[in-house]
Image (cartoon, grey):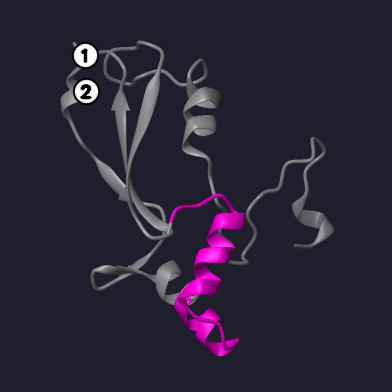
Amino acid sequence: MSESDETDDGEFEPSDTKYQSIVNLDELNRQLAGRVTCSFCGSEGINFEVTRTGLGAKWICRCKNPECSLHELVSPFHTTPKTNRFYDINRELVLGLQLTGCGHSAARRVLSVLNLPL
């Protein structure tokens, strides 16, 4: 990333370059707890629920208020692009490990260092 992508407060803004990052769901929910309000009922608090498949995931944004209509409205989105039914990032991980001569045990080791389940 070039120096021009960094803002004054140290945050990075996306440029034309494609990049991916790993997000801690608990930390994301904690950070959003007091900052996000529901556009339907106006109450504070939105939770992200996750269904994982390897490194890719389907996230559901849901209002914490059980009385809210958004609480019943499920609008999932995928964290990474998919080709057919499979997440591209999972294919890229396998291809990268194959090209470096590593296998399943190396993938398990890499993911365990990153504290990610296989």
Q: Which residue is mark 1?
A: 66
| Residue neighbourhood size for the residue with mark 1, other residues' Cα within 10 Å, grouped as few (<14), some (14–19), many (≥20) | few
Q: Nearer the viewer, residue 22 or 40?
A: 22
Q: Quadrant of the N terminus?
A: bottom right
For the stretch drawn in magenta, what is the main secondary structure?
helix
The disc labelled 1 sits on which kind of residue? Pro
* Viewer-side residue, 103 vs 44: 103
Which image quarter holds the C terminus?
Answer: bottom left
Magenta residues span 94-117
Q: Going 55% across and 82% down the picture, which residue do you hit?
A: 102
Looking at marks 1 and 2 on the same chain, the residue that comes earlier in the sequence is marked by 1
Q: Secondary structure at mark 2?
A: helix
- Determine whether 98 is above or below 91 in the image: below
> In screen coordinates, is 55 left or right of 73?
right
Which of the labelled discs sits on residue 80, or is there none? none
Q: Position of residue 92 (x, y in %)?
A: 47, 76
Is 103 a magenta residue? yes
Q: Quadrant of residue 47?
A: top left
Residue at figure coordinates x 79%, y 62% from the top left? 2
Residue 50 rendering spot, x and y as whole percentages: 34, 42
Picture quadrant where residue 97 is located: bottom right
The kind of secondary structure element at disc 1 is loop
Residue 36 in picture, x, y percent from top left: 46, 21
| Residue designated by label 2 | 71
Q: Is residue 36 above or below residue 3?
A: above
72 vs 33, left or right, is: left
**Picture layout, residue 79 above or below residue 108:** above
